[in-house]
Image (tube, helix red, strand yellow):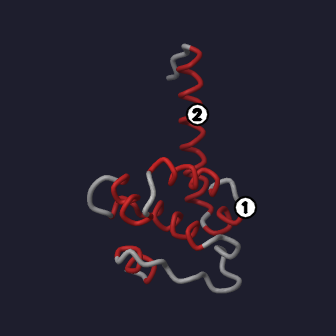
């Protein structure tokens, strides 16, 4: 378990990224959101409950922040694989919603 994981489990913010680190340019909360998305399944219970406990916000607000975050170049530099996966998931959900509105069945 690294320092960010242990601090997140204790409800404390993770330490700031060192200068020159890929997460440079991201706010502390943005770094914590990326860290949570990297390993949210490790938390006991539902993801929504973990969001409420760790971030003190509703899941809706969390996902609004996450969606803005994954569009940032700083986030892409900080964790390209995670951001690409989240963007791909978001795009698939958007396609599904659009198809449903149009009455189209996707394979």
Foreground residue among 42 and 51: 51
In the rendered image, which residue does mark 1 sit on? 73
User: From what the image shows, is residue 44 above or below residue 86?
Assistant: below
Spatial distance from mark 1 to mark 2, Cα to Cα? Answer: 21 Å
Residue farthest to the top, as pictured: 103
Within-10-Å neighbours for mark 1: few <14, some 14–19, many 20+:
few
Query: Is residue 46 left or right of 16 when viewed as pictured?
Result: left
Residue farthest to the bottom, as pictured: 18
Residue 106: x %, y % from top left: 52, 22
Within-10-Å neighbours for mark 2: few <14, some 14–19, many 20+:
few
Residue 47: x %, y % from top left: 36, 54
Tell me the residue at 66%/70% (across/down).
Answer: 26
Tell me the residue at 60%/50% (across/down).
Answer: 67
Residue 10: x %, y % from top left: 35, 77
Q: Under tag 2, what secondary structure?
A: helix
User: From what the image shows, is residue 1 above or below residue 89?
Assistant: below
Q: Under tag 1, what secondary structure?
A: helix
Query: Is residue 87 left or right of 47 when viewed as pictured?
Result: right
Tell me the residue at 70%/66% (across/down).
Answer: 74
Residue 55: x %, y % from top left: 44, 64
Tell me the residue at 45%/58% (across/down).
Answer: 57
Residue 16 location, quadrant? bottom right
Question: Which mark, by number, is residue 62?
Answer: none
Residue 79 location, quadrant? bottom right
In the rendered image, which residue does mark 2 sit on? 94
Quadrant assignment for the N terminus: bottom left
Nearer-N-terminus badge (1/2): 1
């Amino acid at each position: 378990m690294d320092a960010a994981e242990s601090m997140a489990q204790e409800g404390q913010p993770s330490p700031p990224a060192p200068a020159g680190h890929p997460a440079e340019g991201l706010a502390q909360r943005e770094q914590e959101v990326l860290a949570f998305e990297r390993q949210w399944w490790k938390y006991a219970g539902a993801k929504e409950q973990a969001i409420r406990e760790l971030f003190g916000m509703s899941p809706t607000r969390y996902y609004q922040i996450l969606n803005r975050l994954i569009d940032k170049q700083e986030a892409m530099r900080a964790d390209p694989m995670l951001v690409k996966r989240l963007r791909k998931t978001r795009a698939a959900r958007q396609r599904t919603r659009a198809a449903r509105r149009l009455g189209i069945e996707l394979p």
